[in-house]
């Protein structure tokens, strides 16, 4: 049986949930992503469709990273195998879910916010006194010499 691999970029509907299995100690993170969809209508206008709801399972260390980094509204990119799950809901109706199993997070969407620390000029002077630049550092800061391109040193196409 072959599994379809999917690469999905969507928006998180809620903060990811982490579950741990007591018997094995394995952790899984459950994500719910909404993917925006568009369709070209017959009159050549782009029509917005209802977003597609995708569930994803991330296992192991990356599951812990997802819980620590991701939050509602972020737009991670994941890859994994597509599966469809169907079951009876509380009201007795058949429910079908699209699930990305064994997902890997390729991109967390936006970097965690970090505070930018401004170093006052006086403090920078102290740092420079403690760690003076070496002659190697001074050479590295010089701009490179310009070279002219001739027929001898140009790459061939």
Image: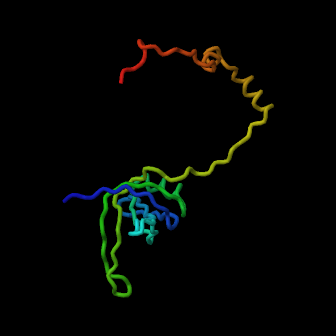
Expressed as whole percent of the image width and height from the top left, the position of residue 3 reads: 25, 58
The part of the image, by quadrant, that contains residue 27 is bottom left
Relative height, residue 150 to residue 79 (above, below) = above
Direction left: furthest residue: 1
Quarter of the picture holding the N terminus: bottom left
Expressed as whole percent of the image width and height from the top left, the position of residue 71 reads: 54, 61
| Number of marks in the rendered image | 0
Quarter of the picture holding the C terminus: top left
The part of the image, by quadrant, that contains residue 87 is bottom left
Expressed as whole percent of the image width and height from the top left, the position of residue 79 reads: 37, 54
Expressed as whole percent of the image width and height from the top left, the position of residue 93 reads: 34, 85
Query: Residue at left 77%, top 27%?
Result: 125
User: As rendered, which of 14 and 29 lies closer to the eye?
Assistant: 14
Query: Residue at left 30%, top 56%?
Result: 5
Relative height, residue 109 to residue 120 (above, below) = below
User: Does residue 65 appear left or right of residue 100 in this picture?
Assistant: right
User: Does residue 129 appear left or right of residue 59 in this picture?
Assistant: right
Direction front: furthest residue: 43
User: As rendered, which of 97 and 59 lies closer to the eye?
Assistant: 97
Query: Residue at left 62%, top 51%?
Result: 113
Does residue 32 appear in this view?
Answer: no
Direction top: furthest residue: 152
Direction bottom: furthest residue: 91
The part of the image, by quadrant, that contains residue 124 is top right
Relative height, residue 75 to residue 147 (above, below) = below
């Amino acid at each position: 049986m072959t599994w379809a691999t999917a690469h999905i970029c969507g928006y998180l509907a809620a903060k990811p949930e982490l579950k741990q299995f007591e018997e094995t100690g394995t952790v899984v993170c459950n994500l719910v992503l909404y993917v925006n969809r568009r369709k070209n209508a017959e009159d050549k206008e782009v029509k917005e469709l209802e977003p597609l709801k995708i569930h994803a399972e991330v296992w192991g260390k990356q599951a812990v990273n997802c819980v620590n980094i991701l939050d509602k509204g972020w737009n991670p990119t994941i890859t994994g195998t597509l599966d469809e799950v169907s079951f009876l809901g509380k009201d007795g109706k058949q429910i079908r879910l699209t699930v990305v199993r064994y997902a890997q997070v390729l991109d967390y969407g936006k970097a965690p916010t970090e505070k930018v620390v401004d170093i006052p000029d006086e403090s920078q002077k102290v740092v420079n006194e403690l760690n003076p630049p070496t002659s190697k550092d001074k050479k590295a800061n010089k701009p490179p010499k310009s070279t002219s391109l001739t027929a001898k040193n140009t790459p061939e196409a």
